[in-house]
Amino acid sequence: MASSAIETDGQEILDLEKNRQAEKAQWVLNAPEPPSLWRELMDSARETVLPHGKRFPYLKDKDGLFKTVISVLQAMFPIFSWCRHYNATKLRNDLLAGLTLASLCIPQSIGYATLAKLDPQYGLYTSVIPPLIYAVMGTSRDIAIGPVAVVSLLMSSMVPKLEDPEANPIAYRNLVLTTTFFAGIFQAAFGLFRLGFLVDFLSHAAIVGFVSGAAIVIGLQQMKGLLGIAHFTNKTDVISVMQAIWRSVHHYWNPHNFILGCSFLSFIILTRFVGKRNRKLFWLPATAPLISVVLSTLLVYLTRADKHGVMIIKHIKKGLNPGSIHELQFNNPHIGEVAKTGLIVAVIAITEATAVGRSFASIKGYRINGNQEMVAFGFMNILGSFTSCYVATGSFSRSAVNFSAGCETAMSNIVMAITVIISLELFTRFLYFTPIAVLSAIILSALPGLVDPHEAYYIWKVDKLDFLVCIGAFFGVLFASVEIGLLAAVIISFVKIIIISIRPGTEELGRLPGTDIFCDVNQYPMAVKNSKALIIRVKSGLLCFANANFVKEKIMKWATEEEENDSKGKRTVQVVILDMSNLMNIDMSGIASLLELQNNLASGGMELAITNPKWQVIHKLRLANFATKMGGRVFLTVGEAVDMCLGAKMAAV
């Protein structure tokens, strides 16, 4: 009597457990419909138009209009947020940082303008308007805005294909300004429409390779100024540049330029070494370029070295940024190429600036808003193109100086811009005798920080496919052109994505001892396989036309091997359980492959069950009547699938 009662109670418990598991399976099968495509598009559009709408609790309050306006202004113009807590201590720190920044910015800006094949004053113009606009709209406290080497190289390598800067400098300048306008439009669009993911097509590995290759090319091109070569190649590949240097050295070059440039390059490198040894002397390497310009200018003026072959800047136009909106060339026959160049420059500039901003933000423990940063860069370049500026972005070397100088807010950019304005008004005529060799030395001194062999080795150690992207960009820039380098990086990245998508991995799962957790048996050798259930998980977020047949064939091969083991008495597989926890979506090809898989398994005496399908997946399977065709074997967890399927088999026996 007692034993029969115990058996009855045990059976009731088993029945209750099965009913509970069946109820959980119904939770999966009877899930509500997911949002429609139209609703998702509308939600995305609403978030794009009013990205901060949920953060403004006063929008529904008629009496809170003023607070709502303030909230909107603070979201669009972050300066309204941090200026409320601004004080004299922060002003003192920003003033010191801004002046230190200007001492580095002025000579670098002149050098980068010559690298971009523009007159020197355009580099100074680019260090006035863009920093002021970024200070109002940007979210980084440390980033320093202005012209940079890589963007200047892009301009000097791509725009001259449309207009010769030596034969027609005015037309070339106008195309550069038009390129800047398009770069700003693309950057603003990326931020306003939340398209920042497009920038991610240039991966970290691609940027490391691209910037390293560009730095080497820039360094070789500076040999023109360092050797005093009058005529040089417009090509950027390393072979053409080396050939130009070789021809010039064997014909005519001026040793005075070389001696002068190398002397001040050694001085700048020495001050950098001293600054690293003593952190209190951070200002020494920051001011070394300006000191070099002042001393070399005085030296050339006093010795009249320009009469003995030393190449000098000569005239720099005095005054603030002139308006240039009427110089934009929208009717130019090359407008398509100009827009393409603008897009490439926009992506490179945003990627570099975002990397710089995030680096220093992580050190200080604050966050930057990626989309707001893109909007800020877009508007500063659009307005910059109206005021004789070419593309500006965040500079790593100047941002590092800004950070080391103790900047507190973006006010340091404002201080720097005001200092450059004063220089444009008062000191440009003193730069007449500045030797070009010293400007080349200043650019060369900034390049070692762009070449990062340690990061390339780290990429090789962690991910070999990423390393292919890195060296593809590096050698493409070095031996072909900037565009080829970028194209090579993007193509290799897409090939990597395609390979991973069309050949996703699969793993067999086993139960960890003493738990209800199922893990990969290769990763966790202690996991125990079930002799009657083959549990497989597909390592892909999408089962689609590109990979469905591959996945089906791989699972069938696995099941066939187990069937052969069954004939040898090693294992008796009765059910194949497909864990869909990784699968985010499925298309018709994926559904068809599952149906075919079920039929093939059924012909071999096995059943198919699926577990934990995501919302979109189960919705499509339900519409395709797949759950009914497979007998409702859809479960919430792998453990429940094992218990229900094998329990039903045992009951049938």
Image (cartoon, rainbow, N blue to C red):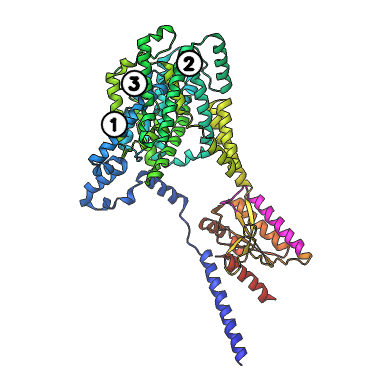
Q: Secondary structure at mark 1?
A: helix
> How busy is the neighbourhood of tag 3: few (under 14 within 10 Å), some, or many (20 plus)?
few
With 6 as the anchor, is 388 left or right in this view? left
The residue lying at 41 percent from left, 28 percent from top is 271
Magenta stretch holds residue 239: no
Please name whichever residue, 623 or 63, is drawn nearer the observer in this view of the structure: 63
Image location of residue 126, percent across then percent down: 36, 26
Q: Quadrant of residue 240?
A: top right
The residue lying at 45 percent from left, 35 percent from top is 352
The residue lying at 57 percent from left, 15 percent from top is 246
> How busy is the neighbourhood of tag 1: few (under 14 within 10 Å), some, or many (20 plus)?
many
Q: Which residue is mark 2?
A: 258
Q: Amino acid at mark 3?
A: His
Magenta stretch holds residue 561: yes
With 538 as the anchor, is 268 left or right in this view? left
Magenta stretch in the rendered image: 539-565
Q: Which residue is mark 3?
A: 326
**Labels 3 and 1: the sequence-earlier one:** 3
Q: Marks 1/2: CA distance?
A: 35 Å
Q: Which residue is mark 1?
A: 415
Please name whichever residue, 296 or 579, is drawn nearer the observer in this view of the structure: 296
